[in-house]
Amino acid sequence: MLQDTGKEPRIGVYVCHCGLNIAGVVDVEAVRESARFLEGVVVVRDNRYTCSEVGQKGIADDIREFKLNRVVVASCSPRLHEKTFRTLLEKSGLNPHLLEMANIREHCSWVHYDNHEAATGKAKDLVRSSVARARLLQPLARTKGRVLPEVMVIGGGVAGISAALYLGGMGIKTYLVEKEPSIGGHMAMLDKTFPTLDCSLCILSPKMVEVAECENIKILSYSEVEKVEGQVGDFRVQVRRKPRYVNEEKCVGCGDCAEKCPVKVKDEFNRNMGTRKAIYIPFPQAIPPAYVIDEHNCRYLTQGKCKICQAVCERGAIEYDQTSYVETIEVGAIIVATGFQPYDPRGLPQYGYGRFPNVITSLDFERLICADGPTYGKLKRPGDSTVPKRVAFIQCVGSRNEASGGAEYKIDIDEEMGSSAGSRDPKAYCSRVCCMITAKQAFMVKEKYPDAEVYVYYIDMRTAGKGFEEFYQRGRHEGIVFLRGKPGEIEEQEDGCLRVVSEDLDSGCILDLVFDMVVLAQGLTPPEGLVEFAQKMNLSRSEDGFLMEGHPKLRPAETAIDGIYLAGCVQFPKDIPDSVAQAGAAAAAAAVMCSKESIEIDPLGPVIDDKLCIGCKLCEMLCPYGAIKVELTDKGPKAKSIEVACKGCGVCGASCSTKAITMKHYTDSQLTAQAKAILEVV
Amino acid sequence: MESVRRKDVPVVTVLDPKFKYEVAREPGGENIKYCFQCGTCTSGCKVAELDSKYNPRKIIRMVILGMRERVLSGDFIWLCATCYTCHERCPQDVRIPEVMNALKNIAVREGYIHPAFRAQAELIAGHGRLYEVDGFANEKRTDWGLTEIPQGCPEVAEIYGITGLHDLLSGGAGGKV
């Protein structure tokens, strides 16, 4: 590591045009010249594309020729090319941490596209401040971290199942964590899938069985992730195992217990439209195929008497003394596949969901039309169990809606109904799958009841997908009438039928029609508790509330955190094939990570000066990752950094009252110099 | 179909959901349900250019919605010039001019015959052609050495009888348009 330290800074400044991305707004030559006489600068250049082979070679040549020991690249976000240039420095014999990037594209030319002069001024300021910081950069030694060849998949829906199968198939030990008693997710609740009309469980349950049989996959059902510590290659995940009160190994799923159980409660798997017992299995194909006791409703667990299930269980599988406990699992990578929750249309009271029994949601419809549902597949309207002859579907309920909905109507509604129905705030985005779900459901009504009149109210029909447009066309040909124009409200009549008024934009008529049943195509919203979950994992969320991917185009299954990947609807609403495809991408990325013997860890974190530390514990209290602890030493209580848990956020350094903590690569002197330079009047 | 008016916008409360199937069963109407209302037909329609009363997209829309009486009793289905421009361009292969023929056939069976067509049919029944050939014209023909054209044409009346057109023209419901 020659040239690194102990010498006067010799800085090279490279200002990038990025084609016209920067040069179209910023006067690149002027920015280059503004840096020429800054302290420590030895050479300044501008490049059409600094990241190109030619651009990189120029920097390497300059490092040799001018004996540079610091490099400033003024171009795009470090998220894109920091790695490129750090590698270049390393190859040229410089420590990679002697690079400083000024973001004059995202932070300058792109946001100030309408003011070239001011953008050029800001670019000069950014370059000047980067040079100021670069003068004080120090080489840092990277540390090596271990990589555990195991992966945790959080969420056992179709995305999580697929990811786990890909990983298990590669011989990677995989933990599949599911909060419900069975894996399967929302897909297990669907009757059929578009556009092929395959029975949903017929295609899902073989995969579920495969998961159960794969020796590399361990299913942790009825379990939730409580805490995540560590970093890429070496995560420690605390998983809360909820008590089933039934021994998973002993239970064979014979069902004698449920038959005799005296307690009947609403069945959430059937969207509260049917009943189940207090000891139950969510659905016949459940994996693991073991019963579970609902502790809030079990007579023995709530009132201390009953024990009927224990008496009838021939296998002795009932264990009332099970308790919840935390299991710590160490893995090298994590795939988050926690799915979505359907939009709760009670947020739009004008449609009467929760008040009018014959207004249902698309997920309710799936259970109603499913052979295993509360009506054994006979479409009966919930109000009076008659078969509806006129069915309307309303699209975009909770999607494509910027307004906050009917918050002004505060209508007393049955809070018990559909407690898992999800968020009530309408969303601005298109939920992507509802058009096809509705087309499929409308088709299923026609298929079962050819004489039924089926109408679909829509704003736009979005059927972009393999075989989707053809399916929509087939639906029209079957006689489903698609009406462009969204109804404003639904009125209930005395006979339980529903009056729907809309403008038919295609004919210019006002349609004032009456239906037996209305199905609301509910949108997809981020899963319950995602905000807290994202905080636990240090993951960012996009404006829409879903987890943010590493890059919208090029890293769609990754996150900004190394070693944590995304699959399925937790990233954004998507259909089954897209969820499975993303699960494959996430599994591949996780496998690449886990196949490494060790990884280099950026040496970001606190350096604690024991002479200044007074052991006040402020840092320990503030650290969100539990990565700094005050320990008693022979010199008194002193803060100690726990490197593997530290994510380098800098809270400890910023809060230290005695300035005993210095953040590596973000020292006070570096940041102050940067701030002062940007405020300098030139 | 019951219809009242609300500020110049027709309000429709009852639709005939079977009408679209009826039209699809009629020769020429087979593909009507494929229509997704793109408007390609109307954009190139020469008749629509002259008279906005004729809008093929809207006519098909009304059929799909089930506005049976309004479609069959209206005169707009008779305005298609059968130039087949829309037929060439329709992305869903709805074959609009043939749909119009199907609609006209149903309309005629229901007794809705456009007065212009009734007048034409009657002219042909009387003269065997769309205009009457008078004595003056025949005199001229004789001068030029051509044969005289007969003034009546009993064969046409016979065809009218066999095809049922005679009954349609004299039927009780006839001439509603």
Image (cartoon, helix red, strand yellow):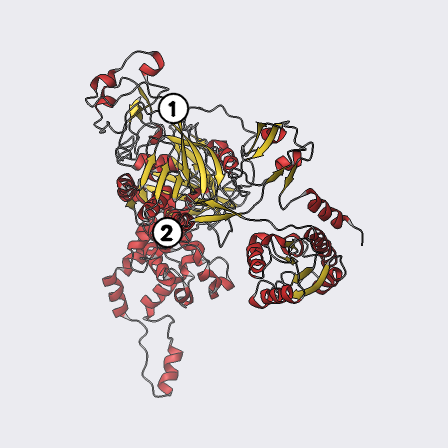
Q: Name the chain letter of the residue that bears numbered label 1.
A: A
Q: Position of residue B34 (x, y in %)?
A: 36, 55
Q: Chain of mark 2?
A: A
Q: Position of residue B148 (x, y in %)?
A: 32, 81
* Residues beneath discs 2 and 1 located on the same chain: yes
A378 versus B51 height, above or below: above
Q: Please name the amino acid that badge 1 sits on.
A: Ser
**The label number, if any, that marks residue A33 in the structure image:** none
| Front in this rendered view, residue A287 or A242 | A242
Comparing A446 with B31, the one in front is: A446
Specify which label sits upstream in the sequence, 2 or 1: 1
Q: Nearer the viewer, residue A602 or B74?
A: A602
- Crowdedness near tag 1: few (<14), some (14–19) or many (≥20) residues, C-alpha within 10 Å: few
Q: Nearer the viewer, residue B174 or A55?
A: A55
Q: Residue furthest left?
A: A314
Q: A187 above or below A243?
A: below
Q: Nearer the viewer, mark 2 or mark 1?
A: 1
Residue A156 image-quadrant placement = top left
Q: Which residue does the image show at 22% across and 26% down from the upper left? A: A255
Can residue B175 be seen here? The reply is no
* Residue A647 placement: quadrant: top right
Please give left or right for residue A625 compared with residue A116 in the image. Answer: left
Q: Residue at x 80, y 54 (%)?
A: A682
Secondary structure, mark 1, is loop
Q: Which residue is mark 2?
A: A472
Whole-Å distance between the Cαs marked 2 and 1?
48 Å
The reply to whether discs 2 and 1 touch (Cβ–Cβ < 8 Å) is: no
Secondary structure of residue under mark 2: helix
